[in-house]
Image (tube, rainbow, N blue to C red):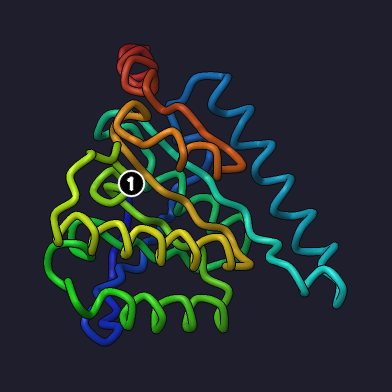
Amino acid sequence: MLLFSTLRSMELSAHHITTQKHWTDLALNSSTLEQLSSLKDRVKQQQVAITVKAKRHSTGIRVLFYGPSDTDKSFTAALLGNELGSEVFSINMSEVISKYIGETEKNLDHLFANAERKGWILFFDEADALFGKRSDSASESDRYANQEVSYLLQRIEEYDGLVILSSNSKDTIDNAFIRRFHYVIDFTHSSATKKIKQKQ
């Protein structure tokens, strides 16, 4: 079970997600679990190996979780937070693009400043709302949306912590964005695994 609390950050709503469950409660296939284990090891190594010299450059880790709804992506992010000793804050990407247009950059600045100061793990849900495949349209709204995407990408790449983006399908994410992730983790088959586990 996930527990949510809401932090109002200027106009941007960030939801603190936690869980009291454990890794053994996850119903994921072995390939997904192996990737998650590799991710945990990398973050832990990063936490102990950061030096003054390394801090001149971003030491952050960018991850994409993809798979249908109800495949434990948010739950997994909360478990990572528990194991790594970091709070996890979820931001709904569709809220960022639709409700806060014109204030997006200012809100993201405030969010990332808080996150960097407190060592949060950032979990961006519905990533395809901003990182979907781009059209050839050159309308004013399209140009503004591209500016927002570029700005968010810049902040994500400069962030020294762990950033997780979540999508229902990898196919909806532009390939140019896919290449920027350190890990692309498939949750697609976890629903089937979950059904098998429930029958046992």
Residue that extends furthest to the front in the rendered view of this protein: 138
Drawn side of residue 132 relative to residue 51, left or right: left
Residue type at mark 1 is Phe
SS for dot 1: helix
- Circle 1 Cα neighbour tier, 10 Å, few/some/many (<14 / 14–19 / ≥20): many
Say which residue appears at 51% left-offset and 63% top-offset. 121
Q: Position of residue 114 (x, y in %)?
A: 47, 82
**Tally of marks:** 1
Q: Position of residue 26 (x, y in %)?
A: 45, 33
Drawn side of residue 162 relative to residue 74, left or right: right
Say which residue appears at 13% left-offset and 54% top-offset. 139
Q: From the image, which quarter does the C terminus lie in?
A: top left
Say which residue appears at 19% left-offset and 54% top-offset. 142
Say which residue appears at 19% left-offset and 50% top-offset. 138
Residue for badge 1: 131
Drawn side of residue 9 relative to residue 197, left or right: left
Between 135 and 63, the one nearer to me in the picture: 135
